[in-house]
Image (cartoon, grey):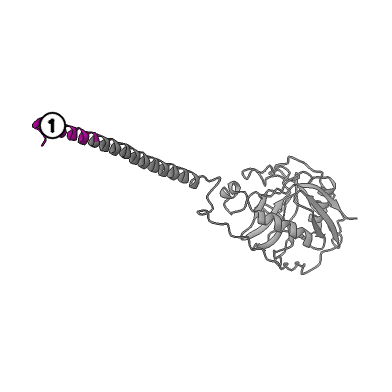
Amino acid sequence: MATNQQRREAAKRKLERQLVRRAERAKRRKIVGVGVVGGVVLIVAGAVVWIVNSSGSSNDAANPPSSSAAPTPPIQIPTQRAPMPKRPTPLANPVSCDYKADAKGKTPKKAEVPDGKNVPSTGTVNVTLKSTAGDIPVRLDRDLAPCTVNSFLSLAKQNFYTDTMCHRLGTSGLQMLQCGDPGAKGDPQTDGQGGPGYTIQDENFPQLTYGRGILAMAKTREPNSGGSQFFMVYGDAQLQPDYTVFGSISDEGLKVLDKVARAGITPESQASSPDGTGLPAMQVKFTGVSVAN
């Protein structure tokens, strides 16, 4: 039988073992607790990083996420050509053309005024507009607008259009590409104001209509204010008969215009335009104009 001393020593050893086990359990709980807290911190931190990065990318206008950006609908281009207009009464042949000095327009590239005497008003002339986007063959029609054709040919032979850029593209409502401003630099605020230094008389008539394949002169709201700027219609164009039609665009040329149209308009220029037109995203710069003999 154990003595009281032996029993006290045994109890002491038991207590010591219990204290050691309790200390070890406490230590293990502390380690696990730190690990859990650390894991939670890492998870929360990771979530914060993900949210910040996601917010940053969704607000990046230069690189919007594909999941939230609304896709731009493809441009709808009619495939059928518009009928070429015809004068109800043929003009006299030849005609006289009145080219007046342009006191309002800017003339960064002044041209020689064409001779307006004895201008033929019958027949056609084939011209190729060579551009960085591809060649655009057109056919000029003297029966429709002899004075405009005479001016265009004069400017072409003077290399007036060489190194000029097309500054205005419309893809909805008014589907056309406008060119011929010698001072165009890709700035919507200043483009479209230049000319050759003279103006051309209007050669329009009430039966004029516009549509795919039509070549016409641009002008201001003032009558007889055309100059060197013209527009090539590749699609719809619901316009009043105020713009001189002086030719047509070949099928090959229309393919080039369709390509330019599908490339779209630069967002910056379109945003600042009241009518939705703007600088074509695909640059069209004339490298030369050839006139068939």
Amino acid tagged 1: Gln
Front position in the image: 121 or 48: 48
Residue at far front of view: 1
| Magenta-colored stretch includes residue 18 | yes
Taking the image as shown, residue 56 lies to the left or right of residue 192, namely left
Taking the image as shown, residue 116 lies to the left or right of residue 282, namely right
Task: Residue at 64%, 55% (x, y): give it.
Answer: 170
Quarter occupied by the N terminus: top left
Q: Secondary structure at mark 1?
A: helix
Residue at label 1? Answer: 6
Residue 42 locus on image (x, y percent): 39, 40
- Helix, strand or loop for the magenta stretch, by majority: helix
Task: Residue at 37%, 41% (x, y): give it.
Answer: 39
Front position in the image: 261 or 34: 34
- Residues shaded magenta: 1-20
Taking the image as shown, residue 169 lies to the left or right of residue 154, namely left
Quarter occupied by the C terminus: bottom right
Task: Residue at 13%, 32% (x, y): give it.
Answer: 6
Residue 100 in view here: yes
Taking the image as shown, residue 38 lies to the left or right of residue 4, namely right
Residue 217 locus on image (x, y percent): 73, 55
Residue 57 locus on image (x, y percent): 50, 45
Residue 225 in view here: no
**Badge 1 local density, few (<14 within 10 Å), some, or many (20+)?**
few
Front position in the image: 146 or 215: 215
Residue 261 locus on image (x, y percent): 67, 56
